[in-house]
Image (cartoon, rainbow, N blue to C red):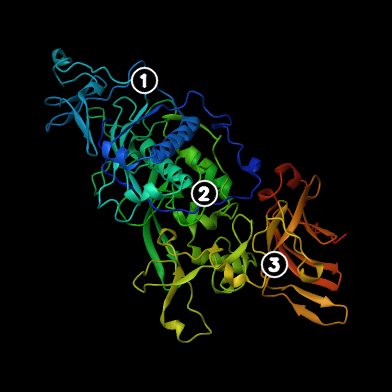
Amino acid sequence: MLWIATAVHLYLISVICTALVYRENFEQYEFAQKEPFKDGIRIKDVWKEDLIEMDVQGLLRSSFKEAVRIWSETLSVRNKFGHRFLIPRLCDSLGLGFQKGRLCCMGNCVPQGTCGSFSVPGHLFDKCRICMDTSADNAIPSGVGLHGTDLLLYVEIGGDNSCADADAYAVICLSDDRTDRVLVANIGVCREMLSFPTSLQITVFLHEIGHALGLDTTVYAFLRHRDGSPRTPRNSRTDTPIVGQDVNGLYIPKNTTGLNVNVTLQTASRNVRKTIFHLTLPTVLQVARRVFNAPNLVSFPMEDLDIPGFKNSHFDGRTAQGELMTQPSGAPQKITHLLLAYMYDTGWYDVSAAHATVPTWGLLAGEEFVTKSCYEFVKLQRQRNKPPTPFCGWPEYNTPTCLPDRSGYGLCDIVQIKSRAWDAHKVDRPDVNVLLRRYSFGGRYLQLNHCPVITDTRKEKLWYRISHVCNQELDIKPTENLALENFGSNSICLDHDRQDPWRVQLENGIERDLGNFGASCHAYQCTQGKGLELIFGNSKYTCPSEGGSIKLTVATDSGQLLGSVHCPICETICLRDHCQTVSSLGQFAKGT
């Protein structure tokens, strides 16, 4: 089906950081090959001359080429063009028809087309096909086309309106009339991008090319099965999807591709009822069920922020933050298997996991992490005596908690938000401050529906600690190391059990309270038959495979370290084979 998309996809600044997780446990998917493609998707780019002049040193174009290289090693087109890349002809105002299995024009074909501010020249178009007049098949003959091309991207300086709140955007222009795969798209580069560091430029281009490749609300009704048949049935006379069109004129996909789900989300101020678009694609669900440990998950939410360019065309930022195709808000922005699964489910591509990263955001957090609001998820985790990471509340505002990737710890980022943001995931007003109870509070980022999250942006508040970064080597004086912390490449952050706060019992019987520590850095090891072992000084403690709180009694130079610690889920740190041998029935090794 030939279509012209009007969706604009925006990209906002992200902070790049690393992740700590045992990757191999979450990379065993048969749909993705491990090796990068050597014959991957062939992307040709055409740049506006004024943008080239602004990119004096060619750094922006170099970043674009690197993004293209990554995508070319990640995707391979299943139905490549033969020797020529040709675009189906556009029609005049009488529009499209369908005849003998091919699209045709009810009136006349037009000699050329547009994409963004570019004119798409006539020599890139296929021959003209006019309905009911086979003799006119060559009224306008085929152009010469392009060689060695699967996707044509026109790159230009972004318009002022689109760049008001964005750094770049993508607009899909034309698709193949045989497979519906995107053939031509426009990328608008906002001027601020010219001053971005190279790594951020590459990430922005990766994101926008991802939209151009097909993560777009206009595309969902045109996705294909792996055998090439449409996922959404077609009208035999018009070749248009039979489910119908929404209020915006977009074709609606079959419910086995995606559907609108009515949800009720609990916040501090009220219950919010929303209708949110969810993907139901089979491989997307396979990955989501694995990543979130949600075997009964029946759909996966897309972004619901009602902002042009955001809604339905990005993965839900609250659930999948850190995925390349979410709206960034300080978490890593990387290709994950969730995105690869979507590209696989389009029916247009084979996929490689060579550049995929395992997410740490919500890893193995359970189905409620996906289906509940962050406010309700935090409440449920507290009832179970589990850390609410990556979300948080007032208890974590001044007391440290581990970052989602366990590379260190931080504090809950809670700010005052506008009271009219009634559907935001607000936190409860603080009990101890009557003055502050007049205001509304939540997380900093709109992209996360104002869910408060753990960050290290307020690290100056941790001045009393040795370091908030676990994986940086440090030499520590034993007399200063009350929590027996260890820093280096083999250390992770561990959350303390706040129902049994840490303290040091000195030899003279006096206890020193460490309740304000909240989290600390410690060495670990993974052992066949034992799974995850945590190291405190000269003692080792074996964690249950599913995680949970274990009690510590560790001898120190000055007395004993007492309290309980939350074990991570073994599989997030150690090889799965090591974890499977550990009983979940209380094999908590005592200090040795």
Q: Circles 1 and 3: CB distance less than 8 Å?
A: no
Is residue 30 toward the left or the right of residue 69 in the image?
right
Q: Which numbered disc flags the more N-terminal residue, 1 or 3? A: 1
Q: Which numbered disc flags the more N-terminal residue, 2 or 3? A: 2
Q: How would you rate the neighbour count of disc 3 (Cα within 10 Å): few for under 14, some for 14-19, many for 20 or more?
A: some
Q: Which numbered disc flags the more N-terminal residue, 1 or 2? A: 1
Q: How would you rate the neighbour count of disc 2 (Cα within 10 Å): few for under 14, some for 14-19, many for 20 or more?
A: some
Q: Nearer the viewer, residue 9 or 15?
A: 15
Q: Quadrant of the C terminus?
A: bottom right
Residue found 58% across the figure and 64% down from its top: 388
Residue type of the residue flagged with mark 3: Ile
Is residue 336 toward the left or the right of residue 417 in the image?
right
Q: Position of residue 326 (x, y in %)?
A: 44, 50
Give the residue at mark 1. Answer: 81
Q: Nearer the viewer, residue 70 or 346?
A: 70
Q: CA distance from mark 1 to mark 3?
A: 60 Å
Residue type of the residue flagged with mark 1: Phe
SS state under label 2? loop
From this view, report whether residue 259 is shown above or below residue 97: below
- Residue 386 in which image quadrant: bottom right
Q: Is residue 345 visible?
A: no
Residue 297's mark? Answer: 2
Q: Nearer the viewer, mark 1 or mark 3?
A: 3
Give the residue at mark 3. Answer: 466
Q: Nearer the viewer, residue 252 or 56?
A: 56
SS state under label 3? loop
Is residue 47 toward the left or the right of residue 410 in the image?
left
Q: Position of residue 224 (x, y in %)?
A: 39, 31
Residue type of the residue flagged with mark 2: Leu
Q: Circles 2 and 3: CB distance less than 8 Å?
A: no
Q: Nearer the viewer, mark 1 or mark 2?
A: 1
